[in-house]
Image (tube, rainbow, N blue to C red):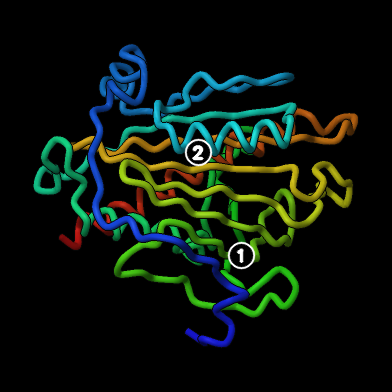
Amino acid sequence: MNKQKLPLFLVCLFFIVQSGFSVPLTSLVSTSHAELLRESGDFITETHQRNPAPVLLPMNTELRQAFTNVRNGLNPNIMIETLYLYRKPANSHTDPGSWNNTQKTGLYNQLLALSTLTGLEYYSPSREEMRTFFEYSQVVDGPDTKYPLPDPVFTVPPAELTIYARQVDLTFGDNIYKYDYINTRDCIFFIQENLDTLSISLVPVIRRGNLRSIMAVFDCGDSLLIYTVIMARTLSVPGMGDRINNSFSNRAEALLKWFSGRAEIVFTAE
C-alpha cells in the first residue's frame, strides 16, 4: 500500500481490540426471533416507513448507540432491517464466551473486501430473473481524488477505521460512499454513507448523506448473527416510492448473501 496515500484512505485510532467474545443468540435477539432464525434458516425482514423504529436491532450497547446516532441525525422516512443466522461448519464452532481471534480477524478483513462486491447479483421479482447489483466496487483513497486502492487487510484489526469506495450499481449509478468500521469486543460492524446525491434515471431521490446502511456481525459459538439495516431520507418523487423500497430490500438481501459467501472463505481456510 502506498504509505503517502494512507492518511487520505483511513483514519485509525486510539486503541486495538485484541480479543473477542461470543454471545448467546438469545442474549442478542428475542426468543421468538432466535427460534425462527434457527428453524427457518431464512432471512427475517422488517420494513418501516414514517417515524421508523427498530424491532430487530440486536441487544448490543455499541451497535445500538451507533444506530441511535445515525437515526437521530438522519430522521429517516424509510428503514429496512434484516436478520440472518449463518451456521458455521462443525469444526469452526467456538467455546461459549470466546470469539476465536483468527476467525474474527478473517471476518473483519472480509467486511473490508469491497472489491468482491463487483458482479454481485440479486433476484428481481419484477423481471423474474437474476440481475447484477454492483457493476463495479473499488476502495479509493478519498472522495475527491478517487485513486483506486486494494482492499485493506489487517493482522490485528483496529478499533475504528474509515475507508472510501467508488461503487456503481444498476439503481443509483456511479457514486462514492464512506464506510466507517467499528471493532468491539462482541461485534464488528460498518456504517455506509452516500457522499453523492443518488438518482434514478437522472431523477434525484436521495441527497448526499441521506442513505445509511449498517451491517453488524456477532459470533454465537456455532453460528454468526448478521444484522443489516438501511435507513434513508428520500425525496418525494411521484412514482418512485415502490422502486426505492424494492431497491433497498434487494440491497439488504444481496449484502447478506455476499457476506455469507465471504464468511465461508474464512471457515474453509481454517
Can you tell which of label 1 and label 2 is closer to the viewer?
1
Rendering coords of residue 111 (x, y %): 43, 56
Extreme residue toward the front, this view? 14
So how many labels did they put on this image? Answer: 2
Closest to the observer, 179 or 255: 179
Query: Where on the picture, by quarter, is residue 154?
Result: bottom left
Closest to the observer, 104 or 269: 104
Is residue 26 shown above or below 169?
A: above
Tell me, yes or no, if residue 109 can be seen here. Answer: no
Rendering coords of residue 133 (x, y %): 59, 52
Query: Where on the picture, by quarter, is residue 7?
Result: bottom right
Residue 164 tag number? 1
Image quarter hosting the C terminus: bottom left
Query: Where on the picture, by quarter, is residue 249?
Result: top right
Tell me, yes or no, if residue 212 can be seen here. Answer: yes
- Image point (70%, 28%), residue name: 78
Mark 2 = which residue? Answer: 253
Residue at mark 1 to residue at mark 2: CA–CA distance: 22 Å
- Image point (74%, 48%), residue name: 209
Label 1 with label 2: CB-CB less than 8 Å: no
- Image point (51%, 59%), residue name: 117
- Neighbour class for label 2 at 10 Å: few (<14), some, many (≥20)? some
- Image point (25%, 48%), residue name: 20
Is residue 119 shown above or below 44?
A: below
Tell me: 233 left or right of 269.
right
Q: Earlier in the sequence, mark 1 or mark 2?
A: 1
| SS of the residue under disc 1 | strand
